[in-house]
Image (cartoon, rainbow, N blue to C red):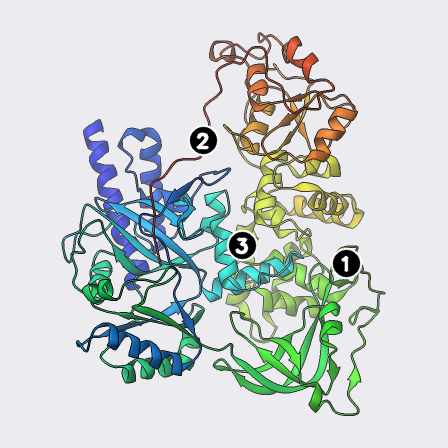
Amino acid sequence: MSETDVQARILALTERLHHLNYQYYQRDISEVSDQEFDQLLAELARLEQQYPQFAQPNSPTQRVGGTITKQFPTAEHRYPMLSLGNTYSEADLREFDERVRRGLEGADYTYVCELKFDGVAMSLTYQDGQLTQGVTRGDGTRGDVVTSNVRTIKNLPLHLRREGPPQPPEFEVRGEVFMPLPVFAELNQEREANGEALLANPRNAASGALKLQDSALVAARRLRFYAYAFLMPGRNQFATHSESLEALAAWGLPVSDTWRRCHSLAEVLDFVHEWDKKRFTLPVATDGIVIKLDDFRQQEVLGYTAKSPRWAIAYKYPAEAARTRLREVEYNVGRTGAVTPVALLDPVPLAGTVVKRASVHNANQIAALDLRLGDLVFVEKGGEIIPKITGVDVAARPADAAPIVYPTACPSCGTPLIRPAGEAHFRCPNDRGCPPQRKARLEHFVSRKAMNIDGLGAETVGRFFDLGLVSDAASLYDLPAKAAELAQLERLGEKSVQRLVAGLEASKQVPFDRVLFALGIRYVGETVAEKLAAHYRTIDALLAASATELAAVPEVGGVIAESAAAWFQESDNRAMVERLRAAGVQLALTGEAPQAVSNRLEGLTFVLSGVFELHSRDELQALIQAHGGKVTGSISKKLSYLVAGDKMGPAKREKATELKVPIITEADLLAMLPTDTEAAETPEEADSAALPASAASAAIGSTDGPVAASAVAPPLPGPKAGTGQQGLLF
């Protein structure tokens, strides 16, 4: 294939995939199977890798992320991102309408009503139909440039469609980035299973995702976007806001179809009342209605106050609340042993559902609310997915209301509960013998993001556990030998068993990092499992690693390392690993490990601390290891160098100074590496060298921070935080 043919194929694939994404995410139409889509995307990625000069700036391959940003640059908004005036009162809406009427001196006017989605305000810039920049609201004047992160939002077009009205060469779109409610619920279930604190609401989850420095992690959060405003330099080409929304939709931008033109305040109030309950049927959190003047010229006439426009207002729905009786508190034991109290209530309608249960979180909240059995309690949803108790009607408390006594023993196995220092939850430490913990670990092992065993879902594996057919993860691979027995079970049958057996066999090809995640080690989520697998490559290396060594792996840290090391040292766990090995489960990464570039750093050990200018910590660790060095997480007398970046904590500096460990900069470290010419030598030929003596001696005992090397080699190429242009929003 000639380069001309390659370029044409890349363009064709890019356009095809943009079209398929639009059809799927905007119109709910699947023109091709998932497999065919993945094949087209894989072909494009392969061609872009071989011929990077032909890759398009907004290629569909960027959807998966992969950009590392150590700190986000900021950009000034071309148009300030002002706040809207808020009200919870229909009387205030009437006053707003009267102010509009007076300001327009009796001229006819129309409003546009839109749902106020509870997410993160975002300003996007499009140039020649291409997404060029994404900027957060920030302080309204400047925001963070998060372009790499917003490019992972799958319903957001990177390349606009050439349909509808003409597109200006450059314009800005303002809208809301949000996390769909089902995604939020799933994320919290995973965090609870991993023993992590639950996220408060979808808005916080979306905001936190956009601040992640690895765009691949942002992609995994499955954020979505709705556009609600159009701005352009000079005179707006549209006469009304409603025309601009229709144009944005025609160009392929996601605009919620819930907006409506209203010709009077009465129609506005009808819209407000209609969505008061109806909004709970949507897969996105909403907290109100935005009312805007439709005519752009009339907007200019009314203008702005110092903080908000005079032509728009946000009506906020009061938090959904209900009053009901607390009958009982039950205590659930999770996979990690955390004991979570759940309030059992008299059924009460709330936010479109009938609520019978509510979260009480932990013993601290029970004490803070002074909850008692028989109390009349207030329950809210607000932005939460799970109802929670927010207060007690103390005046209506029955005389016989009994204080809630938190259990001291596990409600399932009777083991005395413990409360680790610094944690809010009590835990059952009997992880080997506590039935709910064992069952939950099995359910986690077979789950979609872990082993994803076809024909063996959480309900089925829980049933097998209750029947004594399985006891731990390794015992699942004994099920094929029990196929005849399984086929006799109610609601199973021969075909289901065949599917289950095939699913177990297929799971033996699941990559090692997902197997590691599936083991259910506390705090070891998907990302940490991937990092550990990439670093150690085999389960045997992990079994031999100490907590200190594990803590040196980027994004692991002390708490995770201690938990993982304890898990690997437990004899029952090690025995289960051997049974998984015997069953044929992948316990090592396939393919060759990265080859050493030189032995220049052989025998040297480094600690990396702070934020670095040219490379991420992962990249610096990979460089050190590629040249024979080691990276650890703690400072000791045996440490060769502390590599100090920006914002390094004072404790490490003080300890390194006390132990006379040399403190060096990123530039010093890079100067220790061979030049391009030297790197071409074999490791045996490369000359082993340490930091130049002058720099090393200057670093010893230094209390003023990193020192400059006496000779600095040209820095190796690495990603730097990009600069951006101005952004915008409301």
Q: Is residue 255 above or below residue 351?
A: above
Disc 2: which residue: 719
Residue 393, by quadrant, is bottom right
Whole-angstrom CA distance, mark 3 to mark 1, is 22 Å
- The answer to whether mark 3 and mark 1 are in CB contact below 8 A is no
- Amino acid type of the residue that numbered disc 2 sits on in the rendered structure: Pro
How packed mark 1 is, by other alpha carbons closer than 10 Å (few <14, some 14-19, many 20 or more), is some
- Return the x and y of residue 465 as percentages of the image width and height: 69, 66
Mark 3 or 1, nearer chain start: 1
- The residue drawn where x is 77% and y is 62% is 427
Which residue occupies 52% across, 59% down? 204
Q: Residue at x 78, y 72 (%)?
A: 411
> Mark 1 falls on what kind of element?
loop
SS of the residue at dot 2?
loop
Judge the density around disc 3: few (<14), some (14-19), many (≥20) Cα neighbours within 10 Å: some
Q: Is residue 158 visible?
A: no
Check disc 1 and report the residue beneath it.
431
Q: Earlier in the sequence, mark 3 or mark 2?
A: 3
Element assignment for label 3: loop
Q: Amino acid at mark 3?
A: Lys
Q: Which residue is mark 3?
A: 449
**Tag nearer the camera, 2 or 1:** 2
Q: Tell me if 231 is positioned left or right of 238 in this view.
A: right
Q: Is residue 167 above or below residue 291?
A: above
Q: Quadrant of residue 103?
A: bottom left
The Cα–Cα distance between marks 3 and 2, rounded to whole angstroms, is: 30 Å
Report x, y in % for residue 448: 53, 57
